[in-house]
Image (spheres, rainbow, N blue to C red):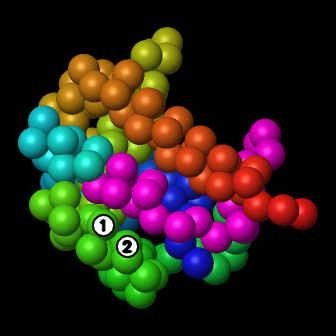
Amino acid sequence: MFNLHRLHAALLLAAAMVAISPPALGTPDRDTQEISRYKLTDAGLSKYAQASRNLGALPKPPSANCAEGETGDTDDSAKSLDESVARLDATDGVRKAITSAGLTTREYVVFSWAVLQAGLAAWALDQPGGKLPAGVSMDNVTFYRKHAVTLQQLGEQTRAADCEEDAAEPE
């Protein structure tokens, strides 16, 4: 079943791996390159926010983990952009919720990853001696910093919607 909070948690973990992977591990894979090349824009953020609101309006399964510190990560997490897109498209209403906002499902997933990658890079740059990780766009970091409050609110709204649905479910 679809759980936007779990998607964001999984994307955060994957973006962390992308942001901290040392160049010595070799050339980034196709998915990492696509995320790194993606340019975050105001128009994209507007569509992403609408898609997120649309997704928030979908019925939620009672399986979201909303206790403090629970991410809901499982070993069956998607291993690629293609797999993430296929899983989202296979969930009732998700594709329509995203495309009605003007994005493809793939753009939605890549935007999510690019935001997380930029956020982690912004954090890294704020650390003593911090450097921009290889392959991360400084323009995206600047975009992230400019829109950090909006992006954080989107994340909180998504998590709150998932958790409110869980709270409404009888035990």
Front residue of this view, candidates 101 and 111: 101
Q: Looking at the magenta stretch, what is its main secondary structure?
A: loop
Q: Position of residue 138 (x, y in %)?
A: 20, 31
Q: Is 116 placed above or below 106 here?
A: above
Q: Give the Cα separation between the discs numbered 2 and 1.
A: 5 Å
Q: Residue furthest top?
A: 128
* Residue sitting at x 76%, y 50%: 167
Where does residue 25 sit, x and y in percent of width and height? 44, 61
Tell me what residue is drawn at x 16 percent, y 32 percent.
139
Q: Position of residue 33 (x, y in %)?
A: 24, 62
Position above or below: 165 against 129: below
Q: Residue at x 51, y 59 (%)?
A: 4
Q: Quadrant location of residue 77?
A: bottom right
Position of the C terminus, as image quadrant, is: bottom right
Q: Is residue 67 magenta?
A: yes
Specify start and end residues of the magenta stretch as a single range.
Answer: 51-70
In the image, what residue type sits under mark 2? Val
| Number of other residues with Cα within 10 Å of mark 1, as a class: few under 14, some 14 to 19, many 20 or more | many
Which dot marks residue 97? Answer: 1
Quarter of the picture holding the N terminus? bottom right
Q: Is residue 16 left or right of residue 51?
A: right
Q: Are marks 2 and 1 in contact (CB under 8 Å)?
A: yes
Residue position marked by numbered label 2 in the rendering: 94
Q: Going by the image, does 11 lie left or right of 70? A: left
Label 1 residue SS: helix
